[in-house]
Image (cartoon, grey):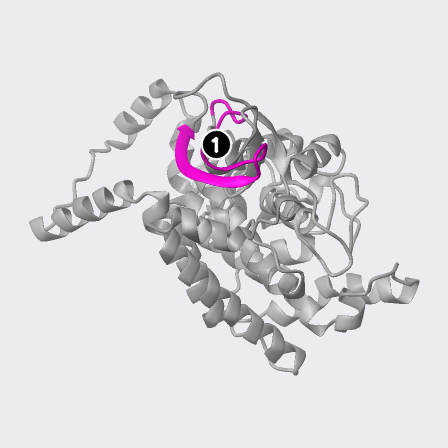
Amino acid sequence: MLKALSISELRPGMFVKNVSKQKKKIKIKTHGWVRSQSLIDQLKNEGILEVIVDFAQSEIEEENQIENKTPEVIEKENKTQNITPKVTKEEPSSVDQKIKRKQVEEEITLENEFSKACIAYDQGLNKVRTMYQDIAAGMQVNVNILHDVANDIIDSVFRNEDAMAVLTRLRDKNAYAWRHTINTAILISVFGRYLKYSKKSVFQLAMGALLHDIGQARVPQGIINKLGKLTELETKAMTKHVEQGFNLCKGEKGVTPVMLDMIINHHERLDGSGYPRGINEDKLSKTARMMAIVDTYDAMTADRVFKQGLEPISVLKHLLGQKDKYDPVLVQQFIKCIGVHPVGSIVKLTSDRLAIVLEGNKNNPIRPKVKVFYNTKHKHYITSKDIHLEIEDTSLKIVSGIKPQDHQINLSRLLKEQLIA
């Protein structure tokens, strides 16, 4: 949707279609994303008064713009333009259905959503695997298949974000590429929802994540899964997956500029040390920065044929310490979103019990809701019990994160035993 905005209303993340009003005629780029406030200030100094913004390509929702205006400005605009609130009448049945659907979504618990999420996850995994195999055989990207996968993920996340997030903790080193694809789509959907993006915008994020590594289907598996250090030629072949993914998706129906941005820029870094182009923060969109964080987080926590994954808290500390590479504000928001100990993680408590993290605590991330299930002192399973560490038992604390294999725990089986209603 196109909309004229004054230069004072322009915000980073918007896509400018063209300049509609200016004090004097000057040569200026007619379209593109606004990357920073400094660019807006430069446009002001050059006499730009009004621009046409395309909200379909922007990273900011049109309805959110009212938050950038004071009540006095809004009231003045309404009087000037003689705006009267528009009421759209709906049939009672339509209204009733919406209310009922909203109530159902609000009532869905982790346990009630988990079995649906498992089915959607497995189906998505099979579709992504098939697509990778088809592309490796020389076929083109089937975007419609990914639409179904993205919609299933988003529907689940908007019913209960924790159910899908739990599944990202499951590891299979022999299916890393496909799991990484699904996991990043889940994580960025959860992140987008936390940042209050609309469902339409979250869909674009999920699709971008599902497509971000698609070029790896054209990279020899021997390079991707090599146990030792890659040679210079192998490294070059590996980095080419970004260009190959971009070329596979460019021009495909249903692939938007936002998705292409995520594909081509997910390995770029703020300090220009990334690839394939080595661009710096001035040219990196918020969406690309989000994708870089999510991509790195899942890759570093994953088990691969040549390495064991790190615990989430270690990776989050790494991201925090790399302020020159990852957007520090977005990293902080990502941590608040998924928690210091993400849902599905196994943690050890001060009571010598092991517990699964069931639900994050955005106000106090180190004190989430957990389900205890194992006594480490006597090395046996116990009757499981839900405990909210901040409300029900403030004396208990999390000592550390635990790798399931250290206690011979089959995480997949444990989750199904403890979470399926």
Comparing 402 with 235, the one in front is 402
Q: In the rendered image, is residue 2 in sight?
A: no
Compared to 42, does 59 lie above or below?
Answer: below
The residues colored magenta run 363-387
Q: Is residue 382 left or right of residue 274?
A: left
Q: Position of residue 167 (x, y in %)?
A: 50, 52
Comparing 356 with 169, the one in front is 356
Comparing 152 with 30, the one in front is 152
Q: Secondary structure at mark 1?
A: loop
Q: Position of residue 263 (x, y in %)?
A: 64, 58
Q: Give the image quarter of residue 64.
A: top left
- Crowd tier of the residue under label 1, counting other residues whose Cα lies within 10 Å: few below 14, some 14–19, many 20 or above: some
Residue drawn at point x = 73 percent, y = 32 percent:
323
386 in the magenta segment: yes
Q: Position of residue 40 (x, y in %)?
A: 60, 33
Residue drawn at point x = 58 percent, y = 35 percent:
376
The residue beneath circle 1 is: 9
Q: Is residue 122 left or right of residue 314?
A: left
Say which amino acid is labelled 1: Glu
